[in-house]
Image: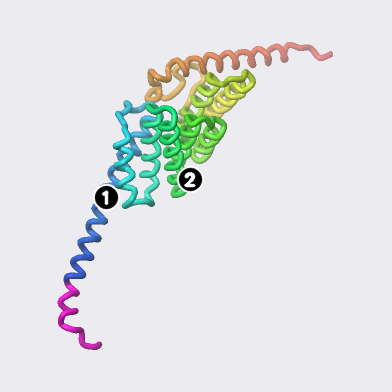
């Protein structure tokens, strides 16, 4: 090996120390961002199915997440958390501010999906944002995809069924209202086949943790119509059985 100049030789230890310092700072920053993203992720998972109380989320939380994402842009949970924060912010806005916030929510969720396309929660969040933005058909389609990615999840079935039922209540045309109800019933029928999941014989037909006060009225109306429909189908079968052949 050739001789290393004395000045350069003295620089090597300092260069190594600087590199170690920078790497340690990056590792610490990554650890901090991961902890924050994980906290938001767990909160929004629980909130989606009524297992926790809402927090007061503001634009300042979005700014914090955006700052962390600059140092950790490949973290899908970070983008999903940002999308959910902007969704919450949009609920308190109107006009151009609403459009801006809900647009940022959808953009963030799309980035999360691009990084983790098979994670069902991200599709659920995107669907929710699209529905709120005024695109119910697209949003419900994204939610259905979430269920397809995790077909044994009672929580995802719950959210999808209630979303269809909620969309039916706000549908303008009677034909569209009935179509939304039919889809809710179709997914409820599928959900009754889940082991240990949804039962169709009670108003409280879901896991106890999912029976929140906010959903009580919506669930009651859904189950009443479901039971009426099942009873009608049962009577039709009896009538068909009593018919004598010509």
Residue 118 is tagged as 2
Labelled pair 1, 2 in contact (Cβ < 8 Å):
no
- The C terminus sits in image quarter: top right
Among all residues in the image, which is located at the extreme bottom?
Answer: 2
To which quarter of the image does residue 181 belong? Answer: top right
121 inside magenta stretch: no
Among all residues in the image, which is located at the extreme right?
Answer: 246
Q: Tag 2 or tag 1, which sits nearer the N-term?
A: 1
Residue 134 in percent (x, y) is at 52, 30
Vertical relation: 246 (above or below) 41: above
What crowding class fits label 2: few (fewer than 14 Cα within 10 Å), some (14-19), or many (20 or more)?
some
Q: Secondary structure at mark 2?
A: loop
Magenta segment, prevailing SS (helix, strand or loop): helix
In magenta, the rendered stretch is 1-13
Q: Is residue 213 left or right of residue 178?
A: left
8 inside magenta stretch: yes
Residue 105 is tagged as none
Closest to the observer, 59 or 3? 59
Closest to the observer, 171 or 52? 171
| In this rendering, the label closer to the viewer, 1 or 2 | 1
For image coordinates 50% across by 29% down, the residue present is 160
To which quarter of the image does residue 240 belong? Answer: top right
Residue 20 in percent (x, y) is at 21, 64
Q: Secondary structure at mark 1?
A: helix
Residue 242 in percent (x, y) is at 73, 11
Closest to the observer, 198 or 28? 28
Residue 93 in percent (x, y) is at 39, 28
| Mark 1 lies on residue | 31
User: Gap between marks 1 and 2, in whole Å?
Assistant: 24 Å
For image coordinates 68% across by 16% down, the residue present is 237
Q: Is residue 246 left or right of residue 181?
A: right
- The N terminus sits in image quarter: bottom left
């Amino acid at each position: 090996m050739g001789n290393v100049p004395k000045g350069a030789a003295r620089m090597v230890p300092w260069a190594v120390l600087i590199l170690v310092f920078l790497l340690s700072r990056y590792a610490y920053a990554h650890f901090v961002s991961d902890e924050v993203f994980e906290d938001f992720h767990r909160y929004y998972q629980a909130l989606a199915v009524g297992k926790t109380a809402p927090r007061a989320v503001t634009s300042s939380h979005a700014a914090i997440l955006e700052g962390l994402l600059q140092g950790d842009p490949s973290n899908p949970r970070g983008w999903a958390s940002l999308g959910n924060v902007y969704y919450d912010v949009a609920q308190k806005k109107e006009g151009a501010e609403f459009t801006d916030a809900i647009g940022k929510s959808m953009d963030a969720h799309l980035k999360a999906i691009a990084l983790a396309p098979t994670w069902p929660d991200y599709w659920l969040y995107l669907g929710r944002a699209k529905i709120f933005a005024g695109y119910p058909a697209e949003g419900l389609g994204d939610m259905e995809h979430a269920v397809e990615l995790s077909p044994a999840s009672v929580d995802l079935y719950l959210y999808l069924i209630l979303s269809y039922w909620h969309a039916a209540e706000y549908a303008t045309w009677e034909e569209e209202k009935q179509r939304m109800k039919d889809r809710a019933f179709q997914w409820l029928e599928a959900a009754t086949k889940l082991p240990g999941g949804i039962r169709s014989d009670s108003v409280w037909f879901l896991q106890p943790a999912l029976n929140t006060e906010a959903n009580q009225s919506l669930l009651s109306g859904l189950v009443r119509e479901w039971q009426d429909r099942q009873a009608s189908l049962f009577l039709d079968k009896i009538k068909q059985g009593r018919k004598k052949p010509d």
